[in-house]
Amino acid sequence: MADIGVIGGSGLYDLDLLQEVETVTPSTPYGDPSGPITVGTMAGHRVAFVARHGSGHRLLPSEVPYRANIFALRALGVRQIFAISAVGSLAERYTPGTLVVPDQLVDRTKGIRAGTFFGDGVVGHVPMADPYCSRLRKDLLSTGVTDGATYCCIEGPQFSTRAESNLYRSWGLDLIGMTAVPEAALAREAQLCYASLALVTDYDCWHDSAASVTVDLVAQTMRANLNAAREVLTTAITQADPDVRCTCHTSLTSAVMTDPALIPDETRTRLGLSSWQPQH
């Protein structure tokens, strides 16, 4: 039904560039996705779009059904995901309004989000040295946006204290947000390509001469730069190759530790392990 998925973050609640649109709500073993998934044609591709926080931005970062979203997109045939996120900047060079394609990720969440498809009788450890697909990153970077940054994912929903913001800066982290974890890891477990386009909305709260982050500031900057983000996304989707072979698609090759004979049938069915086997 679709070969490319788009997960829209704060400010991007629909993809009005889609044509021949239909709306579906796949059922998953992990409950419902964030909302109905819009499927349509864009730049010659079938694209499935889901708003991460739901219609009207109703879900906290910790409440987003990350597993259901990824599972539903995979069930629709998606093999590649572009994720859009609003982020704060922890470095002077990433000014508000900048579009950045992160290449690294640090998890500072608190362990309350369901962060894996494994468990219940099956143990797996996917490689996450490079959490974003290098091939999809190139598609985004072909538009001239900023290359490379380390994204610090916090639990939220509160913004950071000034002490926390300065701590993350001392670690050399570049961007701060609330949704890349566990989304990126779940995409890897589902053997999907995943890359993020991050829109810088503020300087968090460390900057001496810039206003500290507020909801109004985030929304204002997102509105001012949303068209630019849409243009980047459109170009990247145009260049995406739905038939390409990628190492992301074989991430489970050496990841599952459990003896296959010991994996419970119910768990095997729920995980869809048979349909997630590498394509040779």
Image (tube, rainbow, N blue to C red):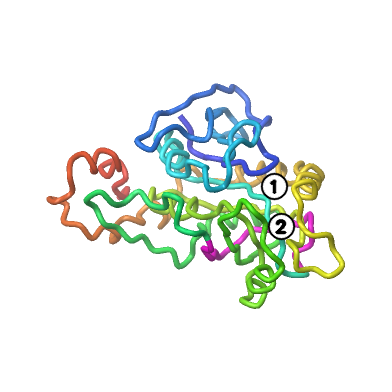
Q: State the residue position of label 2.
A: 145
Q: In the image, what residue occupies the spot 76% across and 62% down?
A: 203
* Residue 99, magenta (yes or no): yes
- Give the Cα distance between marks 1 and 2: 8 Å
Q: Is residue 48 left or right of residue 221?
A: left
Q: Amino acid at mark 2?
A: Val
Which of 17 and 214 lies nearest the eye of the viewer?
214
Label 1 environment density (alpha carbons within 10 Å; few <14, some 14–19, many ≥20):
many
Q: In the image, what residue occupies the spot 76% across and 44% down?
A: 219
Secondary structure of the residue carrying tag 2 is loop
Q: Quadrant of residue 269?
A: top left
Q: Quadrant of residue 10?
A: top right
Which of 235 and 154 lies nearest the eye of the viewer?
154
Q: Residue furthest right?
A: 209
Q: How many marks?
A: 2
What is the x, y in percent for residue 101? 64, 58
Q: State the residue position of label 1.
A: 232
Q: Amino acid at mark 1?
A: Val
Q: Is residue 243 visible?
A: yes
The residues colored magenta run: 93-108
Q: In the image, what residue occupies the spot 64% across and 61% down?
A: 176
Secondary structure of the residue carrying tag 1 is helix
